[in-house]
Image: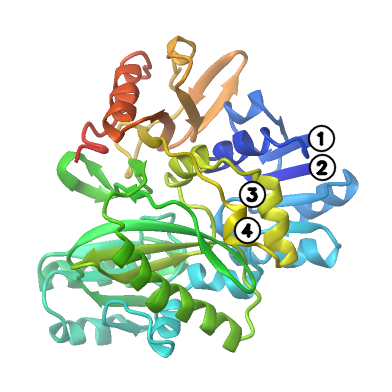
Amino acid sequence: MKILVVGNGAREHTICWKLKQSSKLSKLYCAPGNAGISQIAECVDIKADDLQNLVEYSVNNNIELVVVGPEVPLVAGLVDMLNEKEIMAFGPVKAGAKFEGSKSYSKDFMKKYSIPSARYEAYTDSQKAIEDLNKFNTPIVVKADGLAAGKGVLICETITEAKEAIKSIMDKKQFGDAGNTVVIEEFLRGIEASLLCFVDGKNIIPMESARDYKKAYDEDKGLNTGGMGCFSPNTIFTEELNKYIKENILNRTLNGFLKENIEFKGVLFIGLMIENNQAKVLEYNTRFGDPETEVVLPRLKSDLIDIMLKCIEGNLSEDDLQWKDDKCVTVVLSSGGYPESYEKGKEITGLNEVDDDIIIFHGGTKLSGNKALTDGGRVLAVTAMGKSLEEARNKVYKNIRKINFEKMEYRTDIAKI
């Protein structure tokens, strides 16, 4: 098959890396790709949000399957446009992607179908939102309703902080139009967990579990980021917890999809907060998570093309997903200053000096001649497998010391449990 992957991050590099292992693949393209992806796929100079040109390129180059990585083209309706041209696409249509595109929409859905989640209110008027803050105990969670690149969630310790967060999001437009509406939620305590699921329109089938680290610095300090590291499996998932999630979250979510006539096919990412062997939904995302993808797909034994085709055809079963027992850890190397301001264009050295069993997934990188340069906030995801989390973790940190770029930063406590 001729396959086009849309996106340019470490998630898309991981997807390309896994697709390359399939005997069904004849040619792999990625738009726009990055320095790492260019080693395994033909990169196409079309941005992920340039929907019209992506569709035209797919038609003109006889692409048989398009795999949409990021949320922006999904929410904008790229899958719908491809389907109109009778090109298969892996990812939800616009109606399904709205679960990520609007936090208030997804919270209303959770409430309607009795899916455990935090108590919330949504507001389109900043003054009304500020007036209602006394309905919530501190800490208070303030969220921009729309897409904000993983940075639109602010945890406020005081009412004063929450007021400033509302003003920043709604009045000062910190996240642009994503802040036209805000969602205010109660703060949930517990342990955060990530669950990626394949969805074929009739079934929601979980992948192996993972745990993401959102805060920029060690000990969960600093600002929220897109994710600074991850490990799989998440040790908190017990048989009792899995049963609770299936009955109270997965089955009710699927029931809601069917009742609302939403033909959801692709990946549903469920952010969870776990306490006392019960779970509440923090958020839905409608694509592979990053950096969860970098630890989940390396553990997948099955052919990813097979799985994607079965999702599209509507006949995926649990038996189609076979997993390795090995554990996996990834640590993100970021540009100094991320998630706020940071510099680009720093040369990356040491990539060819790491051990053979280390996988480096490129995020924000680009090629300049034969040099790899930084081109984003999260630059690389250094990944390793091991018989134990400790073994995988030790491999990653040993090899990070061989890699360097100016102002490189990373957390030192990923998978330290």
Q: Work out whether mark 1 precedes mark 2 in sequence or the reverse, and give the earlier one.
A: 2
Q: Distance between the residues labelled 4 and 2?
A: 22 Å
Is disc 1 in contact with disc 2, using a CB cutoff of under 8 Å?
yes
Q: Nearer the viewer, residue 24 or 16?
A: 24
Q: Distance between the residues labelled 4 and 3?
A: 6 Å
Assess disc 2: are there few (<14), some (14-19) or many (≥20) residues with their C-alpha within 10 Å of its C-alpha: some
Q: Nearer the viewer, mark 4 or mark 2?
A: 2
Q: Which of marks 3 and 1 is in front?
A: 1
The amino acid marked with disc number 4 is: Pro
The amino acid marked with disc number 3 is: Ala
Left or right: where does residue 368 sit relative to residue 359? right
The amino acid marked with disc number 1 is: Ser
Q: Mark 1 points at which residue?
A: 26
Q: Distance between the residues labelled 3 and 2?
A: 21 Å
Helix, strand or loop at mark 1: loop
Residue at image location 11% in from the left, 78% down from the top: 137
Q: Is 132 situated above or below 195?
A: below
Helix, strand or loop at mark 4: helix
x and y percentages locating residue 216 in the rendered image: 26, 43
Q: Which of marks 3 and 2 is in front?
A: 2
Q: How far apart are marks 1 and 2 (CA)?
A: 5 Å
Q: Mark 2 points at which residue?
A: 1
x and y percentages locating residue 353 in the rendered image: 44, 9
Residue at image location 44% in from the left, 51% down from the top: 208
Q: Work out whether mark 3 precedes mark 2 in sequence or the reverse, and give the earlier one.
A: 2
x and y percentages locating residue 360 in the rendered image: 48, 26
Q: Name the residue under label 4.
A: 73
Q: Work out whether mark 4 precedes mark 3 in sequence or the reverse, and give the earlier one.
A: 3
Helix, strand or loop at mark 2: loop
Q: Mark 3 points at which residue?
A: 48
Q: How far apart are marks 3 and 1 (CA)?
A: 22 Å
